Image: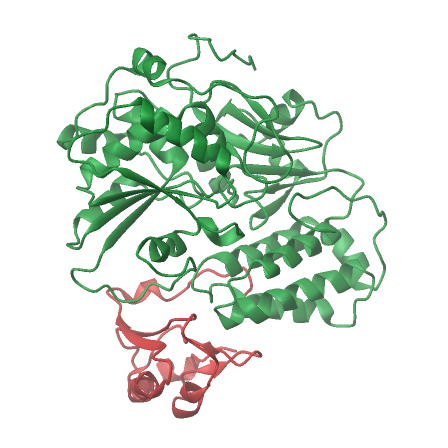
Chain colours: A red, B green
Amino acid sequence: MSNFEADDVAGGGTVTGLRLRIDPVACDGVGLCAVVAARVVVLDRWGFAIMPESLNRKDEGAARAAVRGCPRRALWLQEIPELSETQGRETRFPR
Amino acid sequence: MPIPSTADTRVPVDQLLLENVQLALDGPAQPLRQITAESFAAHQTRLGRLPDVGPPLFDAVERSGLSGHGGAYTPVIWKWRRTLSGSGPVTVVVNGAESEPVAGKDGTIWRQRPHLVIDGLVLAARALHADRVVIWLHGDDFGARAAITTALRERPWTDGVPSAEIVMGPVHYLAGEASAITQAVLGGPPLPTARRPAVPGAPRTLVHNVETLARLALVARGIPATRTRLLSVLGSQRVVVEVDRSIRFGDLLLELGWRAAPQAVLLGGYGGLWAPWQTVCELPVDERQLRAEGLTLGAGVVVPLPAQTCGVAHTAQLLTYLAAMSAQQCGPCQFGLPALADHWSALAGGRARRGGVDRMLSDAALIEGRGACNHPSGATRLVASAVATFADDLAEHAQGRPCRTLKQMTLPGVGL
């Protein structure tokens, strides 16, 4: 289910200092983000958007398109001061 | 442990409660035997007048390490500094809506020592230059409202601090959720919100737990406030007790009259986590030491699971309750929690299908961390801990077998 493709990093794609964020209250599962940013956002089995752990530079444009296109204005881009904040986020259910 | 009478002035100065209590099994923290609240006069005789607010208070709060007592344990000084770094109008709220059905420590503090909490509230309001002061309660907590109203009438109010408004919130599991309170206090619906980028000049709302403010009243007077812990324990009765934080779970249950060892304990509440008895019985109830073991007591709820009952069946009941308590705002919670509840109900009922546990775990991974508030994460944490704690029973159920025993414990608020 991960949107982060390991060979992107190995192939030279750099991770940006941005993170795509969602307001899950605003999200209605319209799914436009998954269409305009298919490499960045996937939908869960109930139709709601799953945010990627990080953003590659080559995906930044698509992410911005998703932010602009969301009919519920549920998405925004957040500057993250330290990349290490998003990597290795603990989960009890390894994906 | 000794149970002092209400007139006992030998209650240690760093003890919050006048006495340990037995509560009604359901609903607000109403004691079975009426206890007279400590009067303002007695409070002042015991502790002296309210200290001043200034840099020494901030130093004392920082040095004491005083943290929150609603489950998140955020250091008070961090919350104060974050609030002071903003610029909009300030509302200080004391959160008296302890929504976990078993929890009763905050309602007990209100009914026994309201002036401790009000002292803490006034101190926080002055420290943060509050424009508004709110006391937030569950809509059905008339006992706390009465105790607070009486206490407020007994004491002169501090100049420069707005009068405290008592606000009765909804009667709901999420009524004590901090972002829901913040939204409600600012005029919106009492529902959780996501944290969006901060807007300069936006209203600032600081929410403190009842017990946190009671301990603040001690810390401000130079009295250390970390010796004890308040716990709400469910057995055949529901009790609130104040114990030394070094007491081990094994000794705690012995003192509370448990004759047989439980098989596991639910820590923190219905949205908390299970731990096997062998793991916890030698551990102290001290939060720091529990966290070193990957455990937490949250808001201090302890629910032992008796030996001859099924952890899988009880987890299914808890998940059904948590699913019903969803605010229905976020997809992963609104749809994911009922899916989890269905998975576990099928397992408990001997209706497991092949691959069912894997699908359940996959759903839990999808839900974790994807709500605006921590409600769905509480459910997924419960699931992860149940998988670890009841591994044998889960394996049996995964083969399609029903519970070995039909004996169940009564969980307040959870219909059978």
| Residue B59 image offset from top left, x and y in percent | 19, 31
User: Foreground residue, B269 or A2?
Assistant: B269
Residue B148 located left or right of residue B172: left
User: How many circles with numbers are drawn on the protein?
Assistant: 0
Give the answer, above or below, for where B197 lies relative to B394.
below
| Residue B407 image offset from top left, x and y in percent | 82, 43
| Residue B262 image offset from top left, x and y in percent | 72, 35
The structure residue drawn at horizontal position 44% and vertical position 31%, both measured from the top left corner, is B146
Is residue B234 among the parts visible in the rendering? yes
Give the answer, above or below, for where B136 lies relative to B38.
below
User: Foreground residue, B23 or B282?
Assistant: B23
- Splitting the image into 4 quarters, where does residue A75 fall? bottom left
The structure residue drawn at horizontal position 55% and vertical position 14%, both measured from the top left corner, is B3
| Residue B164 image offset from top left, x and y in percent | 29, 38
Is residue A12 among the parts visible in the rendering? no
The structure residue drawn at horizontal position 49% and vertical position 78%, both measured from the top left corner, is A48
